[in-house]
């Protein structure tokens, strides 16, 4: 143990020494070159080829430093809790709440379960309106209401405890609604699996739909999440993850941007800093795609069939594993997030780790 600790200290010292050397060299070069570039005509013996070479090397160093920072910040396979969820018949989708509680549903059981911040069941919402229904995916509105999709009956429902029955159908026409999310403007985003579309709309107090907009051309879309820039991301079955802007324009795909090959991307979520996390059912892992830098596999083992993801600002990742009907909780980030002025800023808020 002592030898391992000494080796760990040496590695840290080597990295600190390398970073400081780079910092000093950069400062020295800037102090020498800036006055010359500012006050003298010409570039001396400097040629365009020198500038191009420096640019390429600098870009590579910047990428390497970004990757080092990410690898120091994120953790892999740090499982801190496994929660069994009775009555769902296969945990499929989940929604983290700001008080630390968690909503979980599964497409084989007519319930939405609420787990408290310690992972213990505290409430079960029975899924019934005119008849029993099986919720497929779950999200939360800005007012704290739960909305679910029902792919079998082609319906989106919202939970309203003041009505009887408490589940109310959201107006509008849906074909095979699957994934659901709520973006930063309060707009509800619904994935339609068979037609390869996403519907975006607002609902009023009596659950009427307003301002419907559509995105089409997706191949087997499954799950959807809002991103920190106001847009959203959609996972495609046995395909890719597509990224959209706040005005519903396609801006790229993760496989193209990060040169990453998916097996079957399913569950998807985004954290406050803009990192996108994707569960791959085929590869049985979860990969984080940072705002800049290379992809990082943060869960590489222990998953049977990861189908839903949610993350908290405290550096915790919740994975709905329908293979063994559980929710697995991982600490994937060394530091929690700072209550943001900017979503990119992190600080030293205390981590809220659920206890078994």
Image (tube, helix red, strand yellow):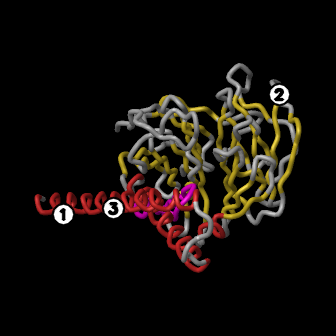
**Residue 300: mark:** none
Q: Position of residue 29 (x, y in %)?
A: 44, 62
Q: Residue at x 51, y 32 (%)?
A: 339
- Relative to the observer, which residue lies in front, 179 or 87? 179
Residue 324 appears in the rendering: yes
Instruction: Give the image quarter of residue 188.
Output: top right
User: Relative to 352, is 90 above or below?
Assistant: below
Report if the CB atoms under discs 2 and 3 are less than 8 Å apart.
no
The residue to which callout 3 is attached is 21
User: Relative to 296, is 354 above or below?
Assistant: above
Instruction: Please report whichever mark, 2 or 3, sits nearer to the chain's N-terminal start.
Output: 3
The residue to which callout 1 is attached is 7
In this view, the mark in front (1 or 3): 3
Q: Residue at x 42, y 56 (%)?
A: 27
Marks 2 and 3, how far apart at CA:
59 Å
Marks 1 and 3, how far apart at CA:
21 Å
């Amino acid at each position: 143990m002592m030898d391992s600790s000494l080796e760990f200290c040496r590695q840290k010292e080597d990295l600190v020494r390398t970073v400081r050397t780079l910092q000093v060299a950069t400062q020295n070069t800037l102090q020498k070159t800036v006055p010359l570039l500012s006050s003298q005509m010409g570039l001396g013996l400097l040629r365009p080829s020198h500038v191009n070479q420096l640019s390429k090397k600098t870009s590579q160093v910047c990428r390497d430093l970004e990757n080092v920072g990410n690898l120091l910040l994120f953790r892999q396979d740090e499982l801190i809790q496994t929660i069994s969820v009775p009555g769902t018949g296969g945990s499929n989708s989940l929604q983290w709440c700001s008080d630390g509680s968690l909503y979980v549903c599964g497409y084989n059981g007519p319930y939405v379960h609420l787990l408290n911040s310690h992972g213990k069941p505290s409430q079960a919402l029975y899924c019934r309106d005119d008849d029993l229904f099986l919720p497929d995916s779950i999200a939360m509105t800005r007012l704290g209401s739960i909305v679910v999709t029902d792919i079998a009956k082609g319906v989106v429902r919202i939970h309203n405890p003041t009505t009887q029955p408490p589940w109310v159908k959201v107006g509008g026409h849906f074909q095979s609604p699957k994934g659901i999310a709520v973006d930063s403007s309060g707009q509800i985003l619904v994935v339609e699996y068979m037609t390869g579309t996403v519907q975006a709309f607002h609902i009023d107090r009596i659950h009427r739909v307003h301002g419907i907009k559509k995105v089409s051309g997706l191949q087997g879309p499954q799950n959807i999440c809002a991103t920190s820039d106001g847009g959203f991301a959609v996972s495609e079955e046995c395909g890719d993850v597509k990224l959209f802007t706040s005005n519903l324009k396609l801006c790229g795909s993760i496989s193209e941007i990060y040169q990453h090959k998916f097996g079957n991307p399913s569950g998807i979520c985004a954290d406050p800093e803009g990192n996108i996390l994707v569960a791959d059912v085929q590869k049985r892992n979860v990969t984080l795609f940072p705002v800049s830098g290379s992809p990082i596999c943060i869960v590489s083992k222990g998953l049977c069939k990861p189908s839903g993801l949610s993350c908290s600002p405290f550096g915790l990742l919740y994975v709905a594993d329908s293979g063994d009907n559980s929710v697995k909780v991982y600490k994937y980030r060394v530091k929690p997030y700072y209550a943001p002025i900017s979503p990119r800023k992190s600080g030293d808020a205390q981590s809220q780790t659920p206890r078994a």
